[in-house]
Image (cartoon, rainbow, N blue to C red):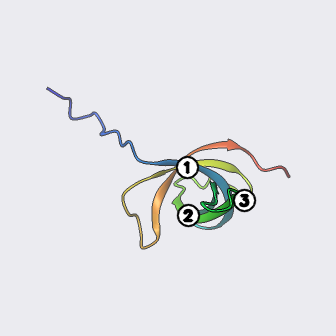
Amino acid sequence: MTDMTEQKVSNGRKVTGRIVSDKMHQTIVVKVERQFKHPLYGKYMKRFSKMVAHDVDNIGKAGDLVVIKQSRPISKTKHWVLVDVLEKAKS
C-alpha cells in the first residue's frame, strides 16, 4: 500500500540553458542551445529555442545558467518549471 503523503515523481524532460529575461512575475525565459550535424555537409550547426518557465520564488536572474523540467501546462505558453540554478550570472 502507498502512503497518501507521497508525491508522484515525474520523469519529464530536463534541459539546461541561460535565462534571457526575468521581467515577468514568477516567469523566466530560458534560451536552450542545441548542436546538430548537417545531414549533407557534415558541419556542426547551432540552433536555439526560447522556453518560458515557471519560477515560483523569483530566484532566477538574467544570465544565470539553469536546469528546467517539463511539466503540465501552467498557462498558454508556460509548460516548464525551474529546477535548479547551476551558475549565477557574473555582475
Q: Are marks 1 and 2 in contact (CB under 8 Å)?
A: yes
Q: Are marks 3 and 2 in contact (CB under 8 Å)?
A: no
Mark 1: amino acid:
Val
Q: Residues within 10 Å of mark 2 (few under 14, many from 20)?
A: some
Give the residue at the far front of this rendering: 40
Q: Position of residue 63 (x, y in %)?
A: 74, 56
Q: Is residue 73 left or right of residue 78?
A: left
Q: Is residue 42 above or below residue 21?
A: above
Q: CA distance from mark 3 to mark 2?
A: 14 Å
Mark 3: amino acid:
Ala
Q: Nearer the viewer, residue 9 or 50?
A: 50
Q: Secondary structure at mark 3?
A: loop
Q: Are marks 1 and 3 in contact (CB under 8 Å)?
A: no
Mark 1 or mark 3, which has the lower sequence index? 1
- Residue labelled with disc 2: 51
Mark 1 or mark 2, which has the lower sequence index? 1
Residue displayed at 28% across by 33% down: 6
Q: Which mark is residue 62?
A: 3
Q: Nearer the viewer, residue 4 or 51?
A: 51
Mark 3 or mark 2, which has the lower sequence index? 2
Q: Residues within 10 Å of mark 3 (few under 14, many from 20)?
A: some
Q: Which mark is residue 15?
A: 1
Q: Position of residue 53 (x, y in %)?
A: 53, 60
Q: Nearer the viewer, residue 37 or 59?
A: 37
Give the residue at the far left of this rendering: 1
